[in-house]
Amino acid sequence: MLPSDQGEPYYIFLLLPWIPGKSYTEYRDVRRSLLEWCCMIVKLNFPEAKDIIGIATETGKNTARSEDVIYLDARDWTEQQQVEAQSVQKEFGILTQTEMFAATEYEYPSQNSESGRGPIQTFKKRDGRMRNKPCPCHSGKKFKHCHGRVE
């Protein structure tokens, strides 16, 4: 995730599924190494990055959850780190096809939403026959997939 403003940190969010046949400790070691490599490759791909923060966790809804967090202070980036990042990126194909895009995601529809229809009113729960009809917010989705879960 690119910074919102110049000088702010770059972020890496890594979701890594459990690796079959690996112990919990081995899985964590692999995840931590991959996260570290990703942070290094962000510096490689974005030389202007000074602060890089990596956060990793496992996928799914396991009862036991863990996270790894890494901070890379890239102000004193060395030639040796540059060579290592290039080698890892080439060998494992990590972040080789990054695309730049900008988007704003609104948690709730607002005046700035794509529909441009302004704020959305609170909807009353519809009966079962209305669940498959278009949502009155004009999102183009069925009510059950849009505001149908709102009480």
Image: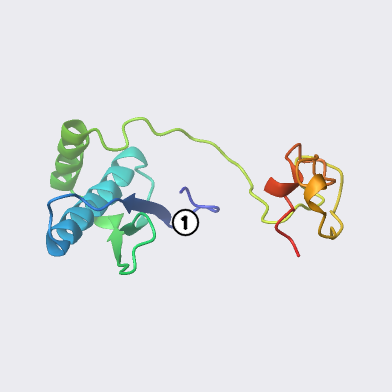
Q: Is residue 26 left or right of residue 126?
A: left
* Quarter where residue 71 is shown: bottom left
Residue 133 spot, x, y in % from top left: 80, 40
Q: Secondary structure at mark 1?
A: loop
Relative to 61, does residue 115 appear above or below in the rendering? above
Which residue occupies 86% across, 49% down? 118
Residue 84 locus on image (x, y percent): 14, 42
Q: Quadrant of residue 69?
A: bottom left
Q: How is the image coloured?
A: rainbow
Q: Is residue 116 left or right of residue 36?
A: right
* Nearest the eye: 31 or 90: 31
* Front residue (pair 37, 108): 108
4 left or right of 99? right
From this viewpoint, is residue 59 visible? yes
Q: The disc labelled 1 sits on which kind of residue?
A: Gly
Q: For the point 29% across and 59% down, which residue is it?
A: 72
Tell me which residue sits at (29%, 41%) in the image. 44
Front residue (pair 19, 99): 19
Task: Please state if 79 lies on the left or on the right of 130 as rendered.
Answer: left
Give the percent coordinates (x, y) of residue 67: 31, 65
Asked whether residue 77 appears in the rendered view, the answer is no
Q: Which residue is mark 1?
A: 7
Quadrant including the C terminus: bottom right
- Please name the residue shown 42% across and 53% down the image: 10
The picture places residue 86, in percent across and down from the top left corner, at: 20, 36
